[in-house]
Image (cartoon, rainbow, N blue to C red):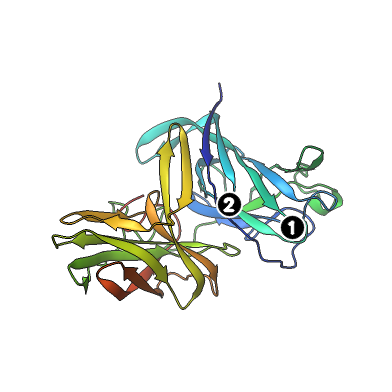
Amino acid sequence: MKTITKLALSGLFAAAGTQAHAHVTFVDGSAAEESTSVISLQVPHGCDGKATTEFQVKLPEGFVLAKPQPKPGWDLEIIQGDYVKSYDDHGTKVTSGPVEIRWKNGTLADAYYDTFNIQGKISGIAAGKTLAFPATQLCGTDGKVVWDQVAAEGADPHSFKNPAPVLTVTAKTAGSHDEHAGMDMGGATAAHDDVVKAGDLDVTGAFTKAMLPGQPVGGGYFTVKNNGKADDRLVSASSSIAGTVELHEMAMQGQVMRMRKLEGGIAIPAGKTVELTPGGLHLMFMKVKEPFKAGGTVPVTLTFEKAGAVDITLPVEAAGPGGHRHN
């Protein structure tokens, strides 16, 4: 029995043109056994010159508990199904989950390439084995490219015209952490509790996450407490390491999760606290000059309607599961 969870993301995305392989491939073609990894599939071209408007990926047995990364400008479908085996999820036996991911209703021109990212756990697959992820590109109503040919054990996948992307499972290195590397048992990294003041406002808990290769945008998160008696509003943000920084919101509308740009800014009511978190209100860094790297920092200038401009620093946390305070 399969069920489908649908999310719609409205926004603008422009991929950077970069030389890529002719086939759909992984940016990094390996992942460690019994660990949670973020895999990144790169789509190098369209269908005979036509733009890609949908990208589908089937998840193999042994890649479980999957979470796709939403992409501005694309709708997202998560198709649920039963696993062949059961898997452990922090002491809970899991027998079903996402088995196929579909990014839909977007536009990736033939002249450009883009990456599509999925977080998931490699489980029950021995080091040295491979996992195939059959993929399909749809280009409008009459264009289609299928990457689903899987080589037999020991055969050369390069002999195929349309090979499926393949991930090689590697052994865990000595001293490596489990799927929550870099986080405590609560799923959070070390707290960033510096307080930055702007008039009656306190800005705390700032952070962002490391970006994957080819990832075009990044998110920014923090908390604003209004200690005054007058309402204020975050009207804009900027950063020296991004072309533009936009104020965005992700929110449920019925059964659909939508992301939109907040042209009017973010209200900070008197006496209230407003949180910018993954999956809610957030900053969106566009045209990033260099991908954010774990351990680094991102400088940001916030401009409030009444409190004026204030500079804050966002520590860059490791990509992957969890977040600073929310997920």
Taking the image as shown, residue 297 lies to the left or right of residue 307, namely right
**Which residue ends up furthest to the top in the rendered image?**
1
Mark 2 Cα-neighbour bin, 10 Å: few <14, some 14–19, many ≥20:
some
Q: Position of residue 126 (x, y in %)?
A: 57, 47
Count the numbered circles shown. Answer: 2
Taking the image as shown, residue 70 lies to the left or right of residue 197, namely right
Q: Position of residue 28 (x, y in %)?
A: 62, 60
Q: Residue 127: which numbered mark, if any?
A: 2
Mark 1 Cα-neighbour bin, 10 Å: few <14, some 14–19, many ≥20:
many
| SS under mark 2 | loop
Q: Residue at coordinates 58% horizontally, 42% vertically from top-left?
A: 75
Q: Residue at coordinates 47% horizontally, 71% vertically from top-left?
A: 293
What's the residue type where badge 2 is placed?
Ala
| SS under mark 1 | loop
Q: Is residue 83 above or below residue 286?
A: above
Q: Is residue 11 above or below residue 199?
A: above
Q: Position of residue 262 (x, y in %)?
A: 42, 55
CA gap between label 2 and label 1 equals: 28 Å
Residue 182 visible in the shown view: yes
Q: Residue 263: which numbered mark, if any?
A: none
Taking the image as shown, residue 14 lies to the left or right of residue 86, namely right
Q: Position of residue 172 (x, y in %)?
A: 50, 57
Q: Residue at coordinates 39% horizontally, 66% vertically from top-left?
A: 236
Q: Which residue is mark 1?
A: 44
What's the residue type where badge 1 is placed?
Pro
In which quadrant of the rendered view does residue 324 lie? bottom left
Q: Is residue 225 above or below residue 259?
A: below
